[in-house]
Image: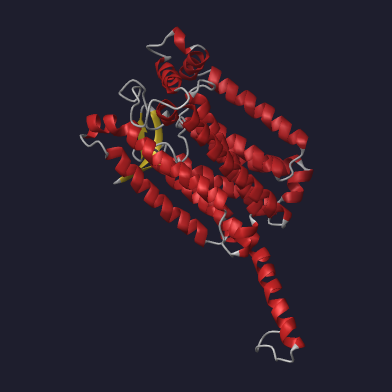
Amino acid sequence: MTAVSVRRGLPLDPLLLGAAVLLAALGTVMVASASISLADRNAGEPLFYLLRHLAALGLGGVAFAFALGVPSETWHRLHWALLLLTIVLLAVVLVPSIGQQVNGARRWLDLGPITVQASEPARLCLLIYLASYAARRESELATSFKGFAKPLAVVALAAALLLAEPDFGAAVVLAATSLGVLFVAGARLRDFAAAVLVGGAALAALALTSPYRVARLMAFLDPWEDPFASGFQLTQSLIAIGRGGWFGVGLGESVQKLFYLPEAHTDFVFAVLSEELGFVGSTLVVVLFGIVVFRAIALGRQALRRGLKFQGLLCVGIGVMLGLEAFINMGVNAGLLPTKGLTLPLLSYGRSSTVVTMAALGLLVRIYYEVNRPARRAMAGARVAPRAAVGIAAGKPLPQGKAA
């Protein structure tokens, strides 16, 4: 919160919103640039993916406004409904007649004119539930393993459903975000450490027992060993980043997006951005995501200090979730992490991700307003008090309903 925003009574965080708007604007430009050739070949319309991305931003604006208009306590009270919605979304998508299978993964709900990636709203709903649980069961969470194990059982169920799709990346983000929220909420260090060890071992076992994931892991360790098969996507991404240099080859001038780099407008849009805008452009993206994450966690800390436990934990959870998604996506593009099917929030072409991310930002802005509302009232009272004192000194009566 800045002094200027309180003084003028603005219920907004200018840094958070400014960074989010810049990311969305930059994402729109990069989706248009990265997808134009692919859209022309697949749909016969160069702006096909751009128009759909703009539609997602429009729906995201509606979701942002809805989240901004609903008091955060309403979500706190709806925790059980949100938990049920999470399980239903993750289970229904596995039904063959409902879930849509693409590239061997059943992650999308076919709703006629639109498709929804079930894991995106499900993860946000589960995050709200966990923040509510930790706020309601604070003492139990901090004093007993049972209080820590109950929410972990819910997370384990959700992660198992995600792995059945399969969506390994979303399961990792969900598990890490959930543990982060429970740790900040006051879970005992020994319980937290045990959960990290068990969860890490389970994810490692799942990765190493799946031939598909083992192949991805081996390609990540040395993509140049097989640059035209298992390592093709990563080597093309590294070539794109390397061509960018300091200032890039110029907007729209990427070569790798011309059918060399698969998923150039979705999972690997950061590589195209690095090629066209260079080190300077990619650094700007990192800084903007850093601002969003920092402001979310700072807002969570401020809410916790004011006794708003649920709001504070939700802000921290959203910050960690967005930060992990961005870190994993950019790490994959740069060859620092194994390939995962995670989009870059607000930048990649991913309609479900865009809408849910904007809804999460709406929650942050709503909580910012609620956290800073007492401060604005106090400053308004401070402005009224001197005028009242002057009126009393001059022998003038106060307006009806006001007292000195």
Q: Residue at x 27, y 39 (%)?
A: 48
**Is residue 268 at least partly visible in the picture?**
yes
Q: Residue at x 67, y 27 (%)?
A: 198
Residue closest to the far left: 44
Residue closest to the far front: 394
**Is residue 160 at least partly visible in the picture?**
no
Q: Residue at x 72, y 57 (%)?
A: 307
Q: Position of residue 172 (x, y in %)?
A: 56, 31
Type of colouring: secondary structure
Residue closest to the far right: 143
In the rendered image, the vertical position of residue 342 relative to residue 317, given as above or below: above
In the rendered image, the vertical position of residue 143 relative to residue 399, given as above or below: above
Counting labels gives: 0
Quarter of the image for residue 177 reads top right
Quarter of the image for residue 35 reads top left
* 150 and 248: which is toward the camera: 248
Residue closest to the far top: 225
Q: Position of residue 287 (x, y in %)?
A: 55, 37
* 239 and 81: which is toward the camera: 239
Q: Is residue 276 left or right of residue 314?
A: left
The quarter of the rendered structure image containing the C terminus is: bottom right
The quarter of the rendered structure image containing the N terminus is: bottom right
In the rendered image, the vertical position of residue 296 relative to residue 232, given as above or below: below
Q: Position of residue 134 (x, y in %)?
A: 68, 48
